[in-house]
């Protein structure tokens, strides 16, 4: 079966500045594929190559088997695109813009615009120049979905959206995927990729360093944990990495399941003042998942030397009882 | 292409209407002065006669007489209109593609099922339509002012050809602006370059007419190929000049299209 999207050795140089390097990737029909990477990794470059906005230095991008070129027009009939910065003609109202967009698909059955607008909480009569960034993003979502495309290409789609609309948007994407629509979206927010995607591609410094099933990402389950201890006593779970100490607070990366961590923390709860558990930053994910090691595989890295200086609590059986 | 054409006409007609009506009003007001100037032509001729011949030649005043309606129009109004329509068209054509990139709306447009060629064609046709509309309004206003303020019967043919000359200047500088916009889409740079070239070319044309040593410079100034004195005297534009200007327009348009089809469109 022809893949929905196919990148073969896709490379782009802007003069001497690299865009993307030798990206090989296929995305199947109906798949939700997340494309994550820090700022400047090449996510938007990849998307612009996919749409024919820029030409590759080497390699090719295909949509449903057809090579994407700057002149290509017809193959975009099946594509809905949401740019990272949703900018539209300010003198039009939302309704006028969506009608203008719909005019390019005269032979297609369109989505129910009033229903879509209600779901996205979008005022169709508002003039676009008066809309906030988030509301313009909603306009972008509407114009991407209006002609019921078979492929959605979304560049950082949730930036600027409030949590409620984000949630509704994710529901829409899940419904699209269930209908067989292919979704390709770029993000630097790990949690939304983990929630939505079947597979994830990790882009770093222009290269596709890994493509994983999202379950594999979840299985790593790395968390950034911060515990503020009473006095200068501190405790670290076995395997804590990248330990940093700031006064009474200790921060570390923990790989494992949350119930295990909480169970271990509970044993030392009397000495803890405050605890926070967060998603690690994308940079931490890259450094510790996909940093260069001799084995070529991801590694959580070694413990910080500062950890050795922390006075560890004695094991519970040996503690002095009050 | 039709979607793009309609959208551009809708977005651009107000600005073009302002230009057209402003130039029409300028023409009409200046023609309003013609009857009194024609009556005092003897004093004017005496005054003008004291100017250096090179200056008279530079502004066509050595062959056209202000006492004649075409002489007055050619030396007082047409020499301004050629510059204004050139600047108007240069800005119009330059902005029609570049604005999409500078405003960031090109991502929306390119993602539609439309080729670069269709975008280029739709926008260029829209610009041509707006420029033609502006020139038609200007022609009608000039004709009306001639009809209102003439002191002697006048032939219409020279006015028609002078208006064609204005249209040609619109096209030449318009396509030049279009070509420059593809290489320099940033508004500030684009505006400076297009207006600068229109002005510089105008001044070069005047200079080439003022001195026999600078005659060859006229090839650097499209204005010299539609100068009022020649058009009025011949009641037409020399075919070689007409063909040459149209060829220049075609080359500029083809060059712009060829590059636009393959250029990278930056985020």
Image: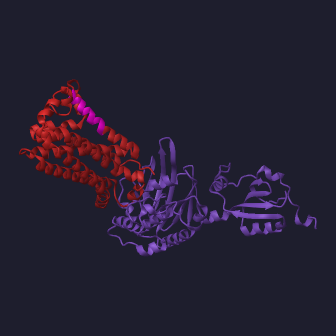
Q: Nearer the viewer, residue A212 or B179?
A: B179
Q: Nearer the viewer, residue A242 or A72?
A: A242
Is B183 on the left or on the right of A200, as rendered?
Answer: left
Among the chains pictured, the one given red colouring is: B
Image position of B128 with respect to B6: above or below: above
Q: Is residue A210 above or below residue B185?
A: below
Residue A225 seen in the figure: yes
Residue B50 relative to residue B1: left or right: left
- In the rendered structure, the colour chosen for chain A is purple
- Report x, y in % for residue A197: 56, 66
Horizontal and vertical percent position of residue A185: 51, 61
Q: Which residues are magenta?
A: B198-210
Asked whether residue A28 is in view, the answer is no
Task: Residue at 24% x, 51% y: name it.
Answer: B20
Q: On screen, A101 above or below A307?
A: below
Asked whether residue B60 is drawn in magenta, I would say no
Number of disc labels: 0
Q: Position of residue A116 (x, y in %)?
A: 45, 73
| Closer-to-camera residue (B188/A200) | B188
Based on the picture, tell me whether residue B200 belongs to the magenta stretch: yes
- Residue under the point 13% across and 43% down: B35
């Amino acid at each position: 079966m022809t893949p929905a999207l196919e990148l073969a050795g896709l490379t782009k140089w802007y003069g001497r500045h690299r865009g993307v390097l030798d990206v090989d990737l296929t995305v199947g029909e109906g798949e939700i594929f997340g494309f994550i990477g820090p700022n400047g990794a090449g996510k938007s470059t990849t998307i612009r190559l996919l749409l024919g906005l820029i030409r590759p230095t080497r390699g090719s991008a295909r949509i449903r088997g057809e090579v994407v070129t700057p002149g290509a027009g017809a193959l975009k009939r099946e594509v809905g695109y949401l740019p990272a910065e949703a900018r539209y003609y300010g003198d039009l109202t939302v309704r006028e813009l969506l009608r203008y967009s719909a005019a390019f698909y005269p032979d297609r059955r369109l989505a129910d615009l009033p229903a879509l607008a209600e779901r996205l909480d979008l005022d169709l009569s508002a003039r676009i120049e008066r809309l906030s960034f988030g509301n313009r993003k909603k306009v972008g979502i509407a114009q991407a979905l209006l002609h019921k495309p078979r492929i959605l290409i979304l560049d950082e789609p949730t930036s600027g959206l409030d949590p409620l609309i984000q949630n509704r948007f994710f529901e829409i994407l899940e419904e699209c995927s269930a209908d067989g629509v292919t979704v390709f979206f770029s993000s630097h927010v790990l949690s939304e990729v983990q929630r939505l995607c079947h597979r994830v591609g990790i882009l770093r410094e222009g290269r596709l360093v890994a493509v994983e099933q999202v379950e594999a990402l979840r299985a790593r389950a790395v968390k950034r944990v911060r515990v503020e201890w009473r006095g200068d006593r501190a405790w670290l779970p076995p395997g804590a990495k990248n330990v940093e100490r700031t006064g009474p607070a200790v921060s570390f990366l923990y790989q494992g399941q949350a119930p295990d961590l909480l169970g271990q923390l509970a044993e030392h709860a009397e000495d803890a003042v405050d605890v926070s558990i967060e998603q690690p930053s994308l940079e931490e994910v890259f450094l510790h998942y996909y940093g260069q090691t001799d084995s070529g595989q991801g590694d959580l890295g070694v413990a910080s030397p500062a950890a050795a200086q922390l006075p560890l609590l004695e094991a519970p059986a040996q503690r002095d009882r009050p | 292409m039709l979607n793009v054409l309609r959208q551009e006409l809708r977005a651009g007609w107000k600005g073009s209407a302002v230009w057209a009506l402003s130039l029409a009003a300028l023409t009409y007001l200046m023609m309003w002065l013609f009857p009194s100037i024609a009556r005092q032509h003897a004093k004017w001729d005496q005054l003008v006669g004291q100017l250096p011949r090179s200056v008279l030649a530079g502004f066509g005043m050595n062959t056209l007489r202000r006492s004649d309606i075409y002489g007055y129009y050619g030396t007082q109004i047409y020499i301004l209109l050629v510059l204004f329509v050139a600047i108007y068209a240069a800005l119009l054509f330059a902005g029609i593609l570049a604005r999409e990139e500078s405003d960031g709306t090109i991502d929306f447009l390119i993602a539609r099922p439309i080729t670069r060629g269709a975008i280029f064609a739709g926008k260029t046709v829209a610009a041509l339509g707006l420029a033609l509309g502006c020139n038609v309004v200007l022609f009608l206003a000039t004709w009306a002012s001639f009809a209102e303020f003439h002191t002697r019967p006048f032939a219409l043919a020279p006015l028609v050809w002078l208006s064609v000359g204005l249209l040609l200047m619109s096209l030449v500088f318009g396509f030049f602006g279009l070509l420059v916009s593809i290489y320099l889409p940033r508004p500030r740079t684009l505006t400076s370059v297009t207006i600068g070239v229109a002005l510089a070319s105008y001044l070069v044309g005047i200079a080439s007419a003022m001195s026999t040593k600078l005659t060859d410079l006229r090839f650097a100034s499209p204005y010299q190929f539609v100068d009022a004195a020649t058009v009025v005297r011949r009641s037409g534009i020399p075919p070689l000049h007409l063909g040459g200007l149209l060829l220049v327009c075609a080359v500029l348009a083809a060059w712009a299209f060829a590059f636009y089809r393959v250029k990278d469109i930056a985020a």
